[in-house]
């Protein structure tokens, strides 16, 4: 199975976590493989979120040391000389995949990652597995139908099956443009390194020689040490069919290699902007419409804000109407552009401890001018994250209709035959601790107010 931030009983890759009314992508792409019929090894692989599991050892030493080690009387190397490879990154060919194994793989994804609801329990889910796998499954189409019914029994409208053609469309959520997903992994010395936890099969990076578990060291000659996965993903982006040179270390123990990769970013800009005159005839307003939160949202919004600032915009209208969401990370990074350092963007919660956290802005805001956010009943998920982050921190007023009310986070997991499952893995709570799922957000105004009313609102606003 392969997202950023996944689990399996065969091999699968988490592609992403989405933020739309049909799924809000919390970026996750992880690939793990193994023997379909070996349950104990499957359970080991389910520890992937902690990047833990059984480890195999490889000795690294100088040529003289290697010569000495060939002697049967050579002493064992000290622990510092042993390089350990993460077992979750070791791949086995998928040819052994059976229909029963595919169903069990989907079952394991839910068992490990599903947020849960009032009708779900691990005990009930185990009984479901026993019932489903009693007989042989002759056809792959039958296996897909069984997975669909199995997921439907959860009673969660957002947890669903994707056939291979539907799953392939998730490439538009690729954050890098070269078909990889990065994750920050703690190193033994207390620092953080960037691991490639997902590779789109036959994508640009995979075709060039990048593999699951590689460590990314540099982009176009620039050391990425100390940089976040999101920032480095942005460094990798560029115009379609241009090239980027990356330096990777294969696994924990392999050689360092410089690889030239051709970009194939399929995302289109979701940001449209213009400068308008305000109602008073003298002020200038920067109007920005974001259609969805994809891999280009933050970068293109940054360009829009800077250009509108340069042209003298005194306040901004951020139009999130009919924006059903997209990538959670993209929405979070967009919100940070407006918030003061230390202010909360969102709180997230889930069964997995890595989903339970508070997310705050790390830097000063790009703009400090008043912001009006336009919303309607199709403003959902990542859009609601942005709207509430700005509103609850007194950076924006909300205008329009009550929002959709989707406070759940999904991850998209690729199964070993190219199909996938979307699973609800967590929920988010606004900075003011409101659970908006099923409730939505009531705006401050139903119609666009004049600037004096907006300024008056901010003068009385308290975080």
Image (spheres, grey):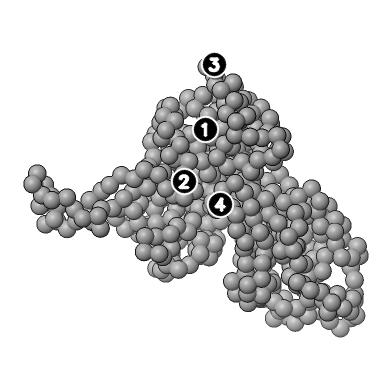
Q: Secondary structure at mark 4?
A: helix
Classify mark 3: residues with Cα within 10 Å, few (<14), some (14-19) or many (20+). Answer: few
Q: Which residue is mark 4?
A: 353
Using the rendered image of the protein, determine whether residue 51 is visible from the camera's viewpoint.
yes
The answer to which quarter of the image holds residue 279 is bottom right
* Residue depicted at x 52% and y 17%: 136
Q: Which residue is mark 3?
A: 135
Q: Do labels 4 and 3 touch, CB within 8 Å?
A: no
Using the rendered image of the protein, determine whether residue 302 is visible from the camera's viewpoint.
no
Classify mark 1: residues with Cα within 10 Å, few (<14), some (14-19) or many (20+). Answer: many
Q: Secondary structure at mark 3?
A: loop
Say which of marks 1 and 2 sits in front: 2
* Residue depicted at x 59% and y 71%: 362
Distance from disc 4 to disc 2, alpha carbons, whole Å, reads: 13 Å
Q: Which residue is mark 1?
A: 105
Distance from disc 4 to disc 3, alpha carbons, whole Å, reads: 36 Å
Q: Sequence-wise, which precedes: disc 2 or disc 3?
A: 2
Q: Which residue is mark 2?
A: 48
Q: Is residue 222 above or below residue 270?
A: below
Distance from disc 2 to disc 3, alpha carbons, whole Å, reads: 30 Å
């Amino acid at each position: 199975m392969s997202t950023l931030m996944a689990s399996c009983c065969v091999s699968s890759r988490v592609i992403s976590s989405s933020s739309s009314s049909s799924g809000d992508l919390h970026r996750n792409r992880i690939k793990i493989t193994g023997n379909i019929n070996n349950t104990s090894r499957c359970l080991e692989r389910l520890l992937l979120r902690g990047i833990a599991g059984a480890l195999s050892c490889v000795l690294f030493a100088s040529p003289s040391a290697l010569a000495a080690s060939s002697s049967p009387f050579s002493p064992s190397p000290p622990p510092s000389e042993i390089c350990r490879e993460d077992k979750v990154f070791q791949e086995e060919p998928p040819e052994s995949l059976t229909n029963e194994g595919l169903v069990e793989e989907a079952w394991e994804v839910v068992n490990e990652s599903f947020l849960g609801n009032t009708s779900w329990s691990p005990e009930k889910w185990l009984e479901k597995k026993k019932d489903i796998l009693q007989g042989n499954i002759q056809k792959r189409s039958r296996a897909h139908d069984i997975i669909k019914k199995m997921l439907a029994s959860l009673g969660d409208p957002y947890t669903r099956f994707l056939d291979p053609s539907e799953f392939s469309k998730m490439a538009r959520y690729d954050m890098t443009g070269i078909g990889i997903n990065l994750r920050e992994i703690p190193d033994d010395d207390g620092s953080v390194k960037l691991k490639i936890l997902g590779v789109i099969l036959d994508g640009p990076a995979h075709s060039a020689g990048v593999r699951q578990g590689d460590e990314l060291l540099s982009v176009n000659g620039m050391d990425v040490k100390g940089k976040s996965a999101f920032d480095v993903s942005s460094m990798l982006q560029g115009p379609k069919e241009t090239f980027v040179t990356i330096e990777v270390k294969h696994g924990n123990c392999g050689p360092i290699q410089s690889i030239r990769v051709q970009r194939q970013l399929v995302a289109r800009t979701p940001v449209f902007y213009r400068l308008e005159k305000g109602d008073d005839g003298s002020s200038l307003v920067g109007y920005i419409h974001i259609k969805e939160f994809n891999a280009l949202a933050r970068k293109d919004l940054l360009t829009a804000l800077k250009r509108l600032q340069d042209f003298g915009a005194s306040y901004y209208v951020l139009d999130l109407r009919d924006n059903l969401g997209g990538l959670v990370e993209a929405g979070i990074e967009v919100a940070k552009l407006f918030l003061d350092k230390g202010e909360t963007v969102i709180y997230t919660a889930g069964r997995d401890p890595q989903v339970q956290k508070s997310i705050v802005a790390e830097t000063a805001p790009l703009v400090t001018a008043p912001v009006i956010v336009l919303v309607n009943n199709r403003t959902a998920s990542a859009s609601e994250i942005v709207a509430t982050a700005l509103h609850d921190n007194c950076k924006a007023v909300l205008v329009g209709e009550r929002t959709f009310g989707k406070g759940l986070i999904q991850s998209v997991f690729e199964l070993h035959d190219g199909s996938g499952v979307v699973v609800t893995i967590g929920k988010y709570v606004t900075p003011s601790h409101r659970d908006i799922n099923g409730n939505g957000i009531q705006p401050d105004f139903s119609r666009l107010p004049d600037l004096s009313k907006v300024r008056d609102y901010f003068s009385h606003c308290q975080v």
